[in-house]
Image (tube, grey):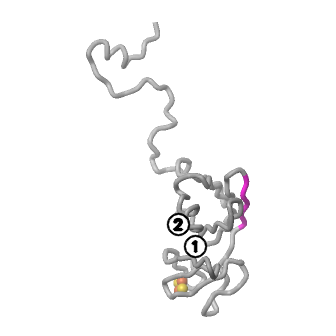
Amino acid sequence: MNVCPSVAMAFMGVSLLESCSSGGEDEVDNGGGSNNQGYTVSGNTVVITLSHSTFSTLNSNGWMNFSAQKMLLLKIDSSTYRAFTNSCPHQGVTTKWSYNSSQDKFKCGEHNNSFPTDCTTKGTAGSSPLKCFTSSFSGGKLTVTKS
Ligand code: FES
């Protein structure tokens, strides 16, 4: 007879919290991978599952600083997204970004320079354009190639 040990133990008055499921794949993420965080990385390519909670800010605010992968993400519409480096072209600060939707510009609060999102127009103070990454959207996933 094939009886689950914890069920058998329960009959004997022993209480166990352990279940009898056989799989181990859904155990707690140990932080070593990115599979449970809504994206996967393979070399320079990042594949993002946009419905994952990690990207809820992108959906609600229209943009986010995806700092784990050093990129800014911008939602143009439900099937059009752009990705940029999050390293400010001025002096490389990565954490002071905001987005002005009426001007369609990212602003770095470190020295208040702003950058158009067309990948070619220079920022204020003569700074280089904000570098774009190649991206494509299909089936709810955004694929970004960092280069
Ligand atoms: S580092 Fe961003 S504006 Fe100076």
What's the residue at 49%, 74% (across, down)?
Answer: 95
Q: Magenta stretch containing residue 2, yes or no?
A: no
Q: Secondary structure at mark 2?
A: helix
In-image side of 87 versus 76 (left or right): left
Circles 2, 1 touching at the beta carbon (< 8 Å)? yes
Q: Amino acid at mark 1?
A: Asn
Residue 112 screen position, x and y as percent: 52, 87
**Chain-order first, disc 2 or disc 1:** 2
Residue 27 screen position, x and y as percent: 46, 38
Residue at mark 2: 67
Looking at the rendering, the stretch of residues picked out in magenta corresponds to 134-138
Can residue 71 be seen here? The reply is no
Q: Amino acid at mark 2?
A: Ser
Residue at mark 1: 86
What's the residue at 61%, 67% (across, down)?
Answer: 73
Q: Magenta stretch containing residue 137, yes or no?
A: yes
Alpha carbon of mark 2 to alpha carbon of mark 1: how far?
7 Å
Q: Which mark is residue 98?
A: none
Q: Quadrant of the C terminus?
A: bottom right
Q: Nearer the viewer, residue 141 or 75?
A: 75
Q: Secondary structure at mark 1?
A: loop
Report if the beta carbon of the residue with label 2 is closer than 8 angstroms to ligand 1.
Answer: no
Residue 133 position (above or below residue 43):
below
By secondary structure, the bulk of the magenta-drawn segment is best described as strand
Q: How many marks?
A: 2
Q: Residue furthest left?
A: 13
Q: Quadrant of residue 78?
A: bottom right
Residue 119 screen position, x and y as percent: 71, 78
Residue 27 position (above or below residue 123):
above
What's the residue at 33%, 28% (across, down)?
Answer: 17
Residue 57 screen position, x and y as percent: 53, 62
